[in-house]
């Protein structure tokens, strides 16, 4: 009974503070309300550590944040490196109840942010001139709570991903251009004073060949450097 009261008190402090101890920015009203609702569902108990397979669930979440760029998101927005370091610390030491609760709520807070960014976007499409209907508000706390109970964190994230065809096309293009960015660690610069016609010569043609070969290489095949130094277009 004493342990339950102590744990409940720790969660009350964490959830009613102006900001989470891991982060400098204050909670905004919506995310704090969602975080409180999530822990009301778990009766102010550890959420991630009470799942069937806590290590697997936490590792899946951190991997999701590491792969955020594949969704056009930024890993650092979800404190991926900081959470990863804290996770290693928890596994290698003997943390107290407050440390467990702080880490548990940090995972929940960042997952709420991630799913919101993934589903609703960072910028309202209406501000960009797109006449799209407002998306239906989803009960994210209930969705997260249910997913953790059945080890379905990745499934929930996949369900939250937009299904519009333009989004899927952009996502596929993003994978291709992220690979190009990794391959060409130094950006290619083309210096062409005028358009090139077939059989014209330019010192830039070999670089163009290199770029187009990389661009057209299927994603399931490695990019092979083209040593063609022929400068005829």
Image (cartoon, rainbow, N blue to C red):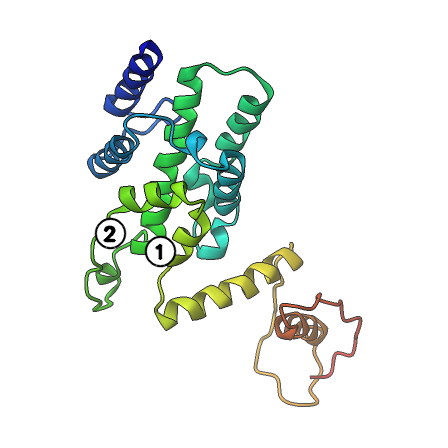
Local secondary structure at mark 2 = loop
Whether residue 195 sits left or right of residue 163 in the image: it is: right
- The residue at the point 57 percent across, 17 percent down is 93
Looking at this rendering, what residue extends furthest in the bottom direction? 198
- Residue at the spot of label 2: 138
Q: Can residue 228 be seen in this view?
A: yes
**Mark on residue 75?**
none
Local secondary structure at mark 1 = helix
Looking at this rendering, what residue extends furthest in the front direction? 1
- The residue at the point 38 percent across, 72 percent down is 165
Percent from the top left, x then y, of residue 5?
Answer: 29, 13
Percent from the top left, x then y, of residue 178?
Answer: 56, 59
In depth, the one of 38 and 20 nearer the eye is 38
Q: Pick the quarter of the image with the N terminus.
A: top left
- Residue at the spot of label 1: 160
Relative to residue 66, is residue 24 depicted above or below?
above
Whether residue 90 sits left or right of residue 134 in the image: it is: right
Dot placed on the residue nearer the N-terminal end, 1 or 2: 2
Q: Do the residues labelled 1 and 2 touch (CB within 8 Å)?
A: yes
Answer few, some or many: residues within 10 Å of disc 1's Cα (few below 14, many 20 plus, some between 14 and 19).
some
Relative to residue 204, is residue 102 depicted above or below?
above
Q: Is residue 184 visible?
A: no
Relative to residue 128, is residue 155 depicted above or below?
above
How far apart, in angstroms, are the residues tagged by discs 1 and 2? Answer: 9 Å
- The residue at the point 23 percent across, 22 percent down is 16
Percent from the top left, x then y, of residue 151?
Answer: 45, 44
Q: Which quadrant holds residue 111?
A: top left
Q: Which quadrant holds residue 167?
A: bottom left
Whether residue 14 sits left or right of residue 79 in the image: it is: left
- The residue at the point 66 percent across, 59 percent down is 183
């Amino acid at each position: 009974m004493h342990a339950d009261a102590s744990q409940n008190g720790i969660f009350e402090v964490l959830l009613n503070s102006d900001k989470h101890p891991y982060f400098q920015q204050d909670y905004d009203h919506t995310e704090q309300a969602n975080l409180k609702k999530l822990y009301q569902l778990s009766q102010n108990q550890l959420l991630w550590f009470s799942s069937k397979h806590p290590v697997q669930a936490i590792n899946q979440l951190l991997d999701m944040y590491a792969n955020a760029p594949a969704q056009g998101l930024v890993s650092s927005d979800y404190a991926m490196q900081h959470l990863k370091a804290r996770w290693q610390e928890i596994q290698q030491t003997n943390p107290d109840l407050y440390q467990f609760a702080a880490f548990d709520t940090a995972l929940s807070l960042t997952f709420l942010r991630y799913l919101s960014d993934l589903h609703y976007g960072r910028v309202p499409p209406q501000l960009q001139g797109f006449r799209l209907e407002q998306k239906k508000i989803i009960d994210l706390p209930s969705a997260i709570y249910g997913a953790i109970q059945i080890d379905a964190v990745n499934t929930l994230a996949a369900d939250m991903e937009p299904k519009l065809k333009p989004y899927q096309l952009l996502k596929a293009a993003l994978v291709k251009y992220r690979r190009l960015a990794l391959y060409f660690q130094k950006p290619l610069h083309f210096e062409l004073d005028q358009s090139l016609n077939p059989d014209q010569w330019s010192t830039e043609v070999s670089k163009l060949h290199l770029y187009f070969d990389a661009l057209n290489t299927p994603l399931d095949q490695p990019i092979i450097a083209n040593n063609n130094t022929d400068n005829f277009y």
